[in-house]
Amino acid sequence: MLMRTDPFRELDRLTQQLLGTSGTWSRPSPMPMDAYREGDDHVIALDLPGVSPDAIDIDIERNMLTVKAERRPVAQADDVQRELSECPLGVFSRQVVLADTLDTDNSKADYDAGVLTLRVPISECSEPRKIAIGGGAAHKQISG
């Protein structure tokens, strides 16, 4: 037997049963995300514990990144009686707007230990460059 004493979780569970929906006030986002720059890549890491790699769909259209994942119940047999169910189940999605300076055609994704890591390189055309000024006696370079 499992026992818990958090009244807000109990209220959330009752709300789910009565309304047939998942409560929102006592649960964190089902797909928490970290985003940072590492060298010449932008990295997006999404926590997806309990999701199999074949249940993850990643789509980039123009500059919109969409990640969809489905978390399925572990035990689906008829004789299984759940005593506690706090892990969110179902289909979750997260959208992120990517900058125009990113090279989305060369994006890479890895999934390890329940963390989906997307690496989107910075486009070479958005890197600063030097432009030479020609002609006459004055020849100098400026930063672009």
Image (tube, rainbow, N blue to C red):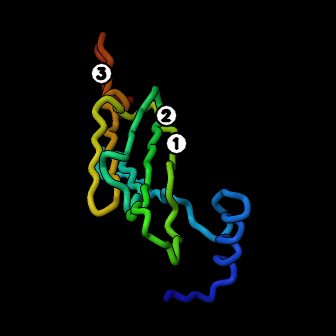
Which residue, given by chain and number where applicable, does mark 2 sit on? 64
First reached walking from the N terminus: tag 3 or tag 1? 1
Secondary structure at badge 3 equals strand
**Picture residue at 51% right of the left edge, 77% below the top:** 83
Q: Looking at the image, is 40 positioned above or below residue 88?
A: above
Name the amino acid, label 2. Answer: Met
In this rendering, position of residue 52 left or right of residue 4: left
Q: Is residue 86 above or below residue 76?
A: below
Instruction: Find residue 132 and name its label.
Output: 3
Work out whether residue 129 can be spotted: no
- Dot 3 alpha-carbon crowd within 10 angstroms: few under 14, some 14 to 19, many 20 or more: few
Answer yes or no: do the residues labelled 2 and 1 have beta carbons within 8 Å?
Answer: yes
Work out how far the residue at label 2 is from the one at label 1, CA to CA, in angstroms.
7 Å
Q: Mark 3 and mark 1: span between their CA atoms?
A: 41 Å
Of mark 2 and mark 1, the one earlier in the sequence is: 2
Residue 123 in view here: yes
Q: Which quarter of the figure has residue 23? A: bottom right
5 left or right of 2?
right
